[in-house]
Amino acid sequence: MTRTELIKKLPKAELHLHIEGTFEPELMFEIARRNRIVTRFSTIADIKKAYNFHNLQSFLDIYYEGANVLLHERDFYDLTMAYLIRCKEDNVVHTEIFFDPQTHTDRGVTFETIFKGIHGALKDAEKELCITSHMIMCFLRHLSEEDAFKTLKDSLPFKKDILAVGLDSSEVGHPPAKFQRVFEAAMKEGYLTVAHAGEEGPPAYIWEALDLLKIKRIDHGVRALEDEKLMDRIISDKIPLTVCPLSNLKLCVFKKLSDHNLKKLLQRGVKVTINSDDPAYFGGYANQNYLETAEALDLSEDELKTLAVNSFEASFLDDKIKLEWIKKVQSC
Ligand code: HPA
Ligand code: ZN
């Protein structure tokens, strides 16, 4: 079996995926047209030309601009369903998706509209495509603590269907400590916690996310290798890292994919997973991330299987279901 065949065959969980980051230009145009919104782009080629990033912020500016055309429950449904159909093609059988309520509520879209659109598609995909899922609500870290508290309050009527809270957007200058009290309040409401840390920010932000926000997984976390004490903690506490190689490449966290530290992390015994982050912007969904990384770092069959096993172990699935998927990975 070739590497490509193995990657296609492996069942996988995706644990780091922003639903707004799956917005393909074709669908963006269609939704803009039906909502009668004029954008500054006149062709799909124009949009793609703008996808040339030099750091996280240069991407975020365009990502928030694209999301502006999402207004109605149906828009959020269509966005989510399009992603789930891609999951089916890549044999992603379980996905834990991030959504950014503040990107939309700040434009007057209600929390209920966003939630119902995304959740409706996830439930339909469970029945029609056999893909299971969880929802993770992210706070935008460039906004205030007060705004995050308001978002937490907005979410409470829907909390039985939202498993965790997360932290995303511009990392540097917005340390996890800024959100310690909101995360404490979220945990009291029964939410699990995750956070982006150590993508562009220093290892100190990863320590804060672990110690102050009590996170169960680190999103990105690739800068952990700069701090040996932190590595010891991550390895001994088995804290998973949701790594996104093509994202790291496009946002210039690493110059070349062959410079990526994923293999080093894996060999040190870190529970690393591979994810697509914002696939419509970064050039590929789950399998493309597995494939290009495998080629660039010369990952072995065993390493690819470990990555797929890790994706289930690091997920928030029940233990029994995790084990069933892990057995299927091992028999590939
Ligand atoms: N980092 C921080 N915020 C984000 C990202 C990311 O990779 N993608 C979407 N929002
Ligand atoms: Zn992300």
Image: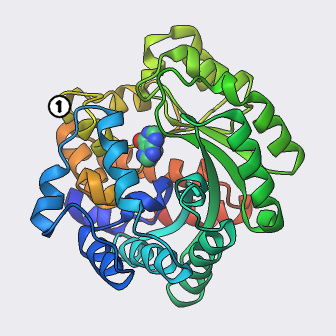
* Image quadrant where residue 2 sits: bottom left
Residue 273: percent from left, percent from top: 46, 45
Q: Residue at x 47, y 62 (%)?
A: 19
Local crowd at mark 1 within 10 Å, few (<14), some, or many (≥20)?
Answer: few
Residue 126: percent from left, percent from top: 59, 82
Residue 152: percent from left, percent from top: 76, 50
272 with respect to 132 (left or right): left
Q: Residue at x 89, y 44 (%)?
A: 188
Q: Nearer the viewer, residue 175 or 2?
A: 175
Q: In the picture shown, does residue 52 fall above or below 284?
A: above
Q: Nearer the viewer, residue 275 or 41?
A: 41
64 with respect to 271 (left or right): left
Q: In the picture shown, does residue 1 fall above or below 62?
A: below
| Residue marked by disc 1 | 256
312 with respect to 260 (left or right): right
Q: Quadrant of the N terminus?
A: bottom left
Q: Residue at x 29, y 60 (%)?
A: 280
* Image quadrant where residue 258 sits: top left
User: Is residue 240 visible to the viewer in this orientation of the structure?
Assistant: yes
What SS does tag 1 mark?
Answer: loop
Q: Residue at x 59, y 22 (%)?
A: 175
Q: Residue furthest right?
A: 188
Residue 58: percent from left, percent from top: 29, 37
The amino acid type of the residue labelled 1 equals: Lys
Q: Quadrant of the C terminus?
A: bottom left
